[in-house]
């Protein structure tokens, strides 16, 4: 007998819920507002079988292109051979969560805009770097070898 290759094969761990997190989804799942253009992460809730995406899309991030009463349309780039294909799929809202992939970018844009407005009000040029800078090496310092101490494990005690 051959090996099964169904839609949900090899999903024993992928679709399983964490310890003590079983059961129906919370109300906040249904109260989340999505807008067209939002980035969303796909994470399957195995308690809801309707509108469940294929296992390939679990963990992927996409952009919302359509919103209906119970589902969200998401565009996801799928690598097929040597090209990327934009796949449009509709997923129920229980399996979709807002992505945090743009938080750092949006915060940086806010900070730069604030700095530009302050500099314009003062009539100066912007002093902070507008582009991201690499962290660079640690500062040079001297190590005092006389203050070193020997680190040993505690002695073994046999207890009966």
Image: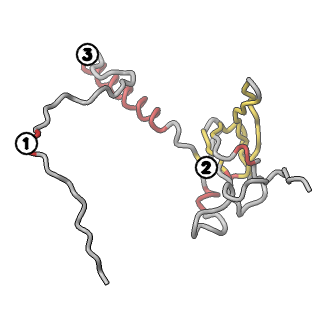
Q: Disc 2 designates what residue?
A: 97
Q: Gap between marks 3 and 1, in whole Å? A: 50 Å
The picture places residue 127, in percent across and down from the top left corner, at 27, 20
Disc on the earlier residue, 3 or 1: 3
Q: Is residue 71 left or right of residue 19?
A: right
Q: Is residue 18 left or right of residue 45?
A: left
Q: Is residue 58 left or right of residue 81?
A: left
Q: Gap between marks 2 and 1, in whole Å? A: 55 Å
Quarter of the image with the N terminus in it: bottom right
Q: Disc 3 designates what residue?
A: 124
Residue mark closest to the camera, 2 vs 1: 1
Residue mark closest to the camera, 3 vs 2: 2
Disc on the earlier residue, 3 or 2: 2
- Point 76% across, 41% down: residue: 89
Q: Disc 1 designates what residue?
A: 146
Task: Kindly indicate whether the residue at mark 2 contacts the one at mark 3 (C-beta within 8 angstroms).
Answer: no
Q: Dot 3: few (<14), some (14–19), or many (≥20) neighbours within 10 Å?
A: few
Q: Dot 2: few (<14), some (14–19), or many (≥20) neighbours within 10 Å?
A: some
């Amino acid at each position: 007998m051959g090996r099964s290759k169904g839609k949900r094969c090899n999903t024993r761990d992928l679709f399983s819920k964490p310890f003590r997190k079983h059961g129906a989804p919370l109300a906040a799942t249904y109260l989340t507002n999505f807008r067209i253009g939002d980035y969303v992460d796909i994470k399957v809730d195995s308690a809801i079988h309707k509108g469940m995406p294929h296992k390939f899309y679990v963990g992927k991030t996409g952009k919302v292109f359509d919103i209906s009463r119970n589902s969200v349309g998401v565009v996801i780039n799928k690598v097929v051979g040597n090209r990327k294909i934009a796949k449009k799929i509709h997923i129920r809202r229980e399996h979709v969560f807002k992505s945090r992939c743009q938080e750092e970018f949006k915060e940086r844009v806010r900070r730069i805009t604030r700095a530009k407005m302050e500099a314009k009000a003062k009539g100066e040029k912007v002093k902070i770097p507008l582009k991201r800078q690499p962290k660079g090496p640690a500062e040079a310092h001297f190590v005092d070898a006389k203050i070193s101490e020997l680190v040993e494990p505690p002695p073994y005690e046999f207890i009966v």
